[in-house]
Image (cartoon, rainbow, N blue to C red):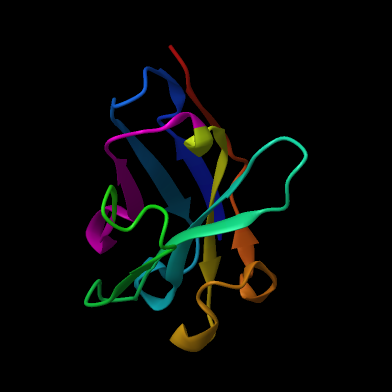
Amino acid sequence: VQLQASGGGLVQPGGSLRLACAASGGTFKSYYMGWFRQAPGKEREFVAAISRGAARAYYVESVEDRFTISRDNAAYTVYLQMNGLKPEDTAVYYCAAKVSDWTSRATATWYDYWGQGTQVTVSS
């Protein structure tokens, strides 16, 4: 499966962005989907994950009251709505897909496919 992330950009603190990740190939509804981010000089960090039927979502604590992950299986797309953005949210954001179970949803090494990343910069 191929993943294409979009929607990044420059936003002021407190602003919002909506990232999208379009998938092609494979059977999208069979994949658990996740968002990760990587800031300069830091390791890749888990942000959010969503189950195959969208019944379950899981977030890193630092974003769980500001970000919302969702998916549209008919459109082969997963979204990340980011509100109340902070400078520390600045990073390249990656979407990823995994075939295996929900229990490893926050671990990057368990994801099978990755998008190319989209830059999010939060600055005044």
The reply, left or right, for residue 43 in relation to residue 84 is right
Q: Position of residue 114 (x, y in %)?
A: 61, 55
Total of numbered circles in the picture?
Answer: 0
Q: Residue at x 62, y 41 (%)?
A: 116
Vertical arrangement, residue 87 with respect to residue 116, above or below: above
The reply, left or right, for residue 103 in relation to residue 115 is left
Q: Position of residue 55 (x, y in %)?
A: 21, 77
Tell me where residue 54 sits by quadrant: bottom left
Q: Position of residue 16 (x, y in %)?
A: 28, 30
| Foreground of the two, 41 or 99 | 41
Q: Residue at x 28, y 35 (%)?
A: 84
Tell me where residue 59 sits by quadrant: bottom left
Vertical arrangement, residue 44 with respect to residue 121, above or below: below
Tell me where residue 29 sits by quadrant: bottom left
First to last magenta residue range: 69-87
The reply, left or right, for residue 76 in relation to residue 94 is left
Is residue 106 located in the magenta-colored stretch of the structure? Answer: no
Q: Residue at x 34, y 47 (%)?
A: 80
Q: Quadrant of the C terminus?
A: top left
Q: Residue at x 64, y 76 (%)?
A: 110
Is residue 83 located in the magenta-colored stretch of the structure? Answer: yes
Residue furthest top as drawn:
124
Q: Quadrant of the N terminus?
A: bottom right
Q: Position of residue 111 (x, y in %)?
A: 61, 70
Vertical arrangement, residue 120 with respect to residue 28, above or below: above
